[in-house]
């Protein structure tokens, strides 16, 4: 009994000790939640040794790939994961009614973020499904009279892939090129619209280079030519002000896990006035106005709604802060390192997504060197292959610069210390890698690399 | 109802900061502390008593959220540590509560109507 009491005292002492330790800011910089079993690098046979201390995890600077859950969002979701577990489509008992009420509240929260009516919001499993519904649904519904779609070369893979599958069904798709800035040419868009065009799809903020397309102007052009306008706003919702009526947007895709909400949920906005008809992709019990059958996951949509509401309140504060941190990161890197190029238009740009190319340094090796910082080069969807990103190719980046690009993501929870640490390590490793590079040596000697004729062996 | 006095607001501010510093995750901890400071500073010149009371009520709700989330995260991470030790041949220590997070959640009163996330409005 004495032994158990002593153990309990010791356990309390350990947890009390980790509290104040975790509060120290500089140590806390790389101090994270204790590493859980699946990611642990410690092999099973050493698990018998008591933990020496908390396991450090990298800084998270990849918010374009996904974002952590905001604690306010988790707080809203938990009751629906534990106690209020009813199916929102059960009409006969309180469990169903309370779930349905929560679902409708969430719908209102999402709608108010983008200036829409709640009846125009359909919950889906994410922006990929929303993009599929918007593009394939509209194209197939109007297939008897309209056979043409327009999109851009820098869209997300799910949009490009949906268009490719529609081409296999007999549709024609125009992939508009982008200028060096990453922004499309509006005159080219106007020229590409044909009498049988049903849909134009242009993403609001690009996930790789952070460029903001002129959505209001595109909306105006499409509305005057009576063509539906879809935008993939996964990276933009909750970060920049969007209004579907001011910008004349007919369809919009929203992703939960890009706005500090849960993964596995998203929404598609489908305009009702004038009505946009969409052919449903998923058949079933007719939920979500027949456009997306299947039980709506109450905890996830409550999370999405909460995330949208928090984003609406925090938008101005977050934007100001993220802009300041982005400025700090870019200035500090550019003043310490020569030959660094920022990809994408510097003016029409969302500050939280910074894509830099470091000349004479290979991107993957820089990422491996920066092992204390979670970064990416290009989008998560294409990170398995070693090909340079198609977005960078579309903006006309040289092959060698495209290979050396890194994307820095700054979000709501990013701190100044994290940015400073990332900058410091980035400068250190770029300098080190350049020292090892024979190309850098040649450039230092004044040789123009483009004039070299490389021989084959 | 009389509006909250300056002392009450300051007490609330200190309580929120104190709770926020107990987040075990670095990013949440630093965000909460920073946002609370900036939020209270932004609203320090509000004079209208009705507005002050609205802001104070929101802040009290937020304090509740912080308290619950700090406890929830602590339980989850403690449980995570224990799960890792379970892979070893040693038996789990006595007093180990694997579902401590769920027992915390049962304190959410499910006999009454569910909480209204629409009133989630933030003071900060």
Image (cartoon, rainbow, N blue to C red):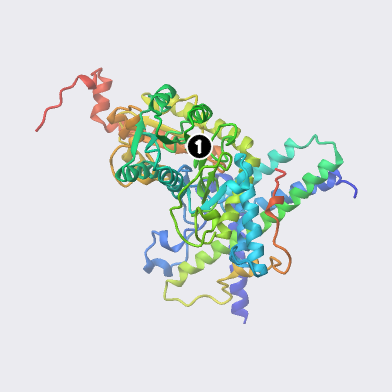
Horizontally, is A9 left or right of A252 in the view? right
Instruction: Identify the element where label 1 is drawn.
Output: helix
Tell me if residue B35 can be seen: yes
Image coordinates of residue A381 in percent, x first then y, are 37, 46
Horizontally, is B51 left or right of A349 in the view? right
Query: Taking A76 as reference, is A154 above or below it?
Result: above
Query: Taking A391 as reference, is A90 above or below it?
Result: below
Image coordinates of residue A209 in percent, x first then y, are 42, 33
Residue at the image point whose x is 46% and y is 31% from the top: A211
Q: Residues within 10 Å of mark 1 (few under 14, many from 20)?
A: many
Q: Chain of mark 1?
A: A
Tell me if residue B24 can be seen: no
Which of A254/A421 is in front? Answer: A254
Residue labelled with disc 1: A419
Circle count: 1
Image coordinates of residue B49 in percent, x first then y, are 86, 41
Which of A92/A385 is in front? Answer: A92
Horizontally, is A79 left or right of B89 in the view? right
Image coordinates of residue A315 in percent, x first then y, are 61, 38
Looking at this view, name the residue that lies furthest to the bottom.
A1
Which of A95/B46 is in front? Answer: A95
Query: Taking A16 as reference, is A251 above or below it?
Result: above
The quarter in which the C terminus of chain A is drawn is: top left
């Amino acid at each position: 009994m004495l032994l158990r009491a002593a153990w309990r005292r010791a356990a309390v002492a350990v947890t009390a000790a980790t509290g104040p330790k975790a509060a120290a800011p500089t140590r806390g910089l790389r101090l994270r939640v204790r590493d859980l079993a699946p990611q642990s690098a410690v092999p099973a046979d050493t698990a018998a040794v008591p933990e020496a201390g908390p396991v450090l995890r990298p800084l998270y600077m990849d918010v374009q790939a996904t974002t952590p859950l905001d604690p306010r969002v988790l707080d809203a979701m938990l009751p629906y994961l534990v106690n209020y577990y009813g199916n929102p489509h059960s009409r006969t008992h309180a469990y169903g009614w309370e779930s349905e009420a929560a679902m409708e509240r969430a719908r209102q929260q999402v709608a108010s973020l983008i200036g829409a009516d709640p009846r125009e919001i359909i919950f889906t499993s994410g922006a990929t499904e929303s993009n599929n519904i918007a593009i394939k649904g509209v194209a197939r519904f109007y297939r008897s009279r309209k056979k043409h779609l327009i999109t851009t070369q820098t869209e997300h893979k799910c949009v490009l892939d949906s268009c490719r599958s529609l081409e296999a069904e007999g549709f024609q798709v125009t992939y508009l090129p982008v200028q060096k800035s990453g922004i499309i040419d509006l005159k080219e868009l106007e020229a590409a619209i044909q009498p049988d065009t049903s849909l134009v799809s242009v993403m609001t903020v690009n996930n790789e280079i952070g460029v903001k397309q002129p959505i209001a102007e595109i909306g105006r052009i499409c509305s005057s030519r009576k063509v539906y306008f879809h935008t993939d706003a996964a990276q933009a919702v909750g970060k920049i002000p969007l209004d579907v009526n001011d910008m004349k947007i007919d369809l919009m895709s929203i992703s939960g896990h890009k706005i500090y909400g849960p993964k596995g949920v998203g929404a598609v906005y489908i305009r009702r006035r004038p009505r946009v008809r969409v052919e449903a992709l998923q058949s079933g019990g007719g939920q979500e106005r027949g456009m997306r059958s299947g039980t709506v996951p109450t905890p996830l949509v409550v999370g999405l709604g909460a995330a949208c509401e928090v984003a609406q309140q925090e938008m101005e504060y977050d934007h100001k802060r993220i802009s300041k941190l982005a400025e700090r990161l870019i200035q500090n890197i550019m003043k310490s390192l020569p030959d660094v190029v920022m990809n994408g238009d510097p003016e029409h740009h969302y500050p939280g997504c910074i894509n830099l190319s470091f000349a004479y340094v290979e991107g993957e090796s820089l990422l491996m060197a920066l092992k204390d910082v979670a970064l990416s080069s290009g989008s998560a969807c294409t990170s398995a292959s070693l090909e340079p990103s198609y977005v960078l190719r579309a903006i006309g980046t040289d092959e060698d610069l495209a290979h050396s690009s890194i994307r820095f993501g700054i979000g709501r929870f990013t701190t100044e210390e994290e940015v400073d640490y990332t900058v410091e390590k980035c400068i250190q490793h770029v300098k080190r890698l350049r020292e090892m590079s024979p190309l850098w040596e040649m450039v230092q000697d004044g040789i123009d690399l483009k004039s070299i004729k490389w021989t084959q062996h | 109802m009389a509006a909250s006095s300056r002392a009450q607001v300051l007490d609330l501010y200190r309580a929120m900061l104190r709770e926020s510093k107990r987040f075990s995750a670095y990013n949440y901890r630093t965000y909460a502390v920073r946002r609370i400071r900036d939020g209270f500073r932004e609203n320090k010149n509000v004079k209208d008593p009705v507005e002050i009371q609205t802001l104070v009520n929101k802040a009290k709700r937020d304090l509740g959220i912080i308290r619950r989330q700090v406890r929830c995260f602590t339980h989850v991470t403690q449980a995570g540590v224990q799960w890792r030790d379970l892979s070893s041949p040693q038996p789990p220590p006595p007093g180990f509560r694997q579902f401590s997070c769920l027992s915390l959640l049962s304190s959410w009163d499910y006999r009454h109507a569910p909480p209204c996330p629409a009133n989630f409005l933030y003071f900060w």
